């Protein structure tokens, strides 16, 4: 009886409350697609704002460029971007020190050695592969072949004579001098650089002058990241070997690292606004459009293609329509200029092709060979760091964003990122 009574109540309930269909079931595929798209934008709000900031920065720069702004206007427009760069650079030093020390302190010396060996091997191999790729592309395309026939004034490419006298041996010695900084505080502000000066000495006995070379080692402005990394690596490994006695110092740097990461989160919400004005300001500061085209990657190829069509099709047709003469006979008089322009175009094409092959083929193949995972999924998680790098133009300035992408978006082990990223940012500068 109870079962029949329950069935009767269920039937009455169904009659009084007919089953309602969900709103999404009656919606069109277009509406579902829009809802999914808006949900994706909401879940990746910071990335969406950064992409919009880069796009609006390009648009703003090109539009304001048409009005020929003054230097004061450019300075005021670049001010929000300058503030972003200052905030990012402010966080670099505490981020590198706390990340390296905590990353190595929690590892045993054997694991630290293996991790360092793997990281340096990877950076060395990718650098060698990039160099080989560049040599192959230059040998095949030969972008400077036509430029050899063009006479160019040497004064246009003159450089600092003191810089030309620096040899490879001087650079190697400076590398080791910077690696072992004599003052760790000074390493955060200055680095060592060796120069050579020619001293002309007059000999009274022979009435002749003798040129002697004097080596001058001086400090120049710039953070000595190599010295900081060397000190922090030794400091972190030493803390790890001290056991419980080193835990108070380890906790201090762990808290410092957590504080820095929280500050990075705050800066990231300002970054879309700062990147927009930073990109716009950089576009306005560039006076040479050809240099601007080379800086914008594929935009350079588009500009050069448009110039080629205009110079080889549009203008010759206009010339022939007016004069009824062969336009290419006229071009022979400016052959050197055309050869120089073609050489610059081939150089830009070679550089962009090499970057594309290295970024889209070489590195993804290495990633897949080691991890057996989709490399472009990894690229998707690093998009925020890529956009910040485009806006700032500095691997060191984008380092805080790279930490955030790897640790929070891609969920990589913090012990690995804290050790590998500071070294990578320094090696690839």
Image: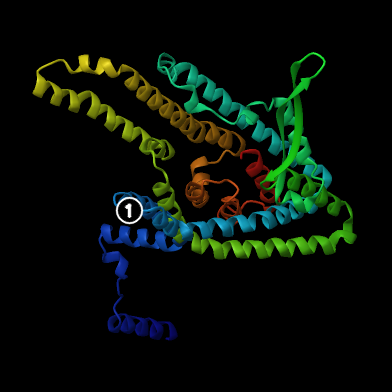
Residue at the spot 42% in from the left edge and 57% down from the top edge? 72
**304 relative to 189 in the view: left or right:** left
**Residue 404 screen position, x and y as percent:** 58, 56
- Residue 8 visible within the image: yes
Residue at the spot 66% in from the left edge and 34% down from the top edge? 122
**38 relative to 306 in the view: left or right:** right
Q: Which quarter of the figure is the C terminus placed in?
A: top right
Residue at the spot 58% in from the left edge and 56% down from the top edge? 88
- The local crowd at label 1, few if under 14, some if 14 to 19, many if 20 or more residues have their Cα within 10 Å, is some
Q: Nearer the viewer, residue 338 or 22?
A: 338
**25 relative to 125 in the view: left or right:** left
**Residue 164 screen position, x and y as percent:** 63, 27
Q: Nearer the viewer, residue 95 or 103?
A: 95
- Badge 1 element: helix
**Residue 22 screen position, x and y as percent:** 32, 70
Q: Which quarter of the figure is the N terminus placed in?
A: bottom left
Q: Nearer the viewer, residue 1 or 340?
A: 340
Classify 18 as above or below 27: below
Number of numbered discs visible in the structure rendering: 1
**Residue 203 screen position, x and y as percent:** 79, 19
Residue under pointer 1: 64
Render colour scheme: rainbow
| Quadrant housing residue 91 | bottom right
Classify 390 as above or below 117: below
- Residue 47 visible within the image: no
């Amino acid at each position: 009886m109870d079962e029949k009574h329950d069935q009767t109540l269920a039937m009455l309930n169904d009659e009084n409350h007919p089953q309602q269909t969900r709103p999404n079931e009656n919606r069109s595929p277009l509406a579902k697609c829009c809802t999914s798209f808006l949900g994706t934008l909401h879940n990746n709000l910071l990335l969406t704002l950064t992409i919009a900031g880069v796009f609006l920065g390009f648009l703003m720069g090109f539009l304001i460029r048409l009005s020929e702004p003054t230097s004061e206007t450019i300075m005021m427009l670049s001010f929000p971007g300058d503030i972003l760069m200052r905030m990012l650079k402010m966080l670099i030093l505490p981020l590198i020190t706390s990340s390296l020390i905590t990353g190595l302190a929690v590892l045993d010396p054997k694991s630290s050695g293996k991790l360092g060996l793997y990281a340096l091997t990877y950076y060395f191999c990718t650098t060698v592969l990039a160099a080989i790729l560049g040599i192959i592309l230059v040998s095949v395309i030969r972008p400077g072949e036509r430029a050899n026939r063009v006479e160019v004034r040497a004064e246009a490419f003159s450089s600092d004579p003191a810089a030309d006298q620096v040899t490879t041996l001087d650079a190697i010695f400076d590398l080791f001098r910077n690696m072992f900084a004599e003052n760790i505080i000074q390493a955060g502000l200055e680095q060592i650089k060796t120069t050579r000066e020619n001293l002309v000495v007059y000999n009274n006995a022979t009435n002749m002058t003798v040129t002697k070379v004097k080596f001058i080692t001086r400090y120049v402005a710039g953070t000595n990241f190599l010295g900081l990394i060397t000190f922090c690596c030794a400091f972190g490994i030493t803390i790890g070997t001290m056991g419980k006695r080193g835990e108070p110092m380890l906790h201090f740097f762990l808290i410092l690292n957590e504080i820095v990461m929280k500050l990075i989160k705050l800066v990231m919400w300002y970054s879309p606004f700062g990147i927009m004005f930073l990109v716009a300001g950089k576009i306005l500061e560039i006076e040479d459009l050809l240099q601007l085209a080379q800086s914008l990657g594929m935009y350079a190829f588009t500009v050069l293609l448009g110039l080629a069509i205009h110079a080889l099709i549009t203008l010759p047709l206009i010339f022939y329509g007016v004069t009824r003469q062969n336009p290419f006979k006229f071009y022979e008089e400016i052959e050197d200029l055309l050869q120089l322009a073609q050489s610059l175009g081939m150089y830009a094409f070679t550089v962009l092709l090499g970057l594309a092959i290295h970024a889209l083929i070489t590195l993804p193949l290495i990633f897949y060979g080691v991890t057996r995972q989709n490399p472009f999924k990894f690229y998707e998680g690093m998009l925020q760091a890529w956009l910040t790098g485009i806006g700032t133009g500095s691997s060191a300035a984008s380092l805080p964003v790279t930490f955030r992408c790897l640790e929070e978006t891609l969920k990589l082990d913090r012990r690995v990122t804290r050790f590998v990223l500071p070294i990578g940012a320094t090696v690839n500068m």
